[in-house]
Amino acid sequence: MIEAIKLFAYKGIKELELKGLNHINVICGKNNSGKSSVLESIIQPKCR
């Protein structure tokens, strides 16, 4: 289970930290706000 997400300089997202994620989570926002980028970062992680 994913408990937290941290993104730095990923696509159009400068910095994002999501904590306290549980069994069901919803990502919502305006068009072009980075929702798909957050999902892609979970599905295709790029570790450095």
Image (cartoon, rainbow, N blue to C red):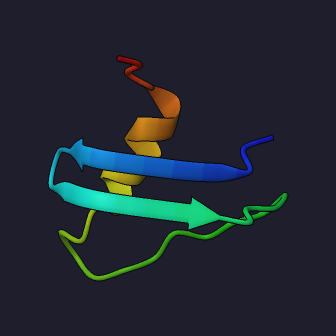
- Tell me residue 19's x, y (percent): 65, 64
Task: Locate residue 25: give its quadrant.
Answer: bottom right
Location of residue 13 by image quarter: bottom left
Q: Is residue 4 left or right of residue 20?
A: left
Q: 23 or 18: nearer the eye?
A: 18
Location of the N terminus (image quadrant) = top right
Residue 12 vs 44, above or below: the answer is: below
Residue 43 location in percent, x, y?
50, 31
Q: Which residue is depicted at the point 72% across and 44% down? A: 2
Which quadrant is home to the C terminus? top left
x 20%, y 58%: residue: 14
Q: How many marks?
A: 0
Direction from residue 24 to residue 18 in the image, left or right: left
Q: Position of residue 42 (x, y in %)?
A: 51, 37
Above or below 22: residue 36: above
Asked whether 32 or 42 is in front, the reply is: 42
Find residue 20 and report its image quarter: bottom right
Q: Residue at x 52, y 69 (%)?
A: 27
**Left or right: 30, with 28 as reference point:** left
Instruction: Single out the residue that lies furthest toward the top.
Output: 48
Pinpoint residue 28: horizontal percent, then vertical percent: 46, 76
Q: Nearer the viewer, residue 16 or 26?
A: 16
Residue positioned most to the bottom: 30
Q: Considering only vertical position in the picture, is 48 above or below 9?
A: above
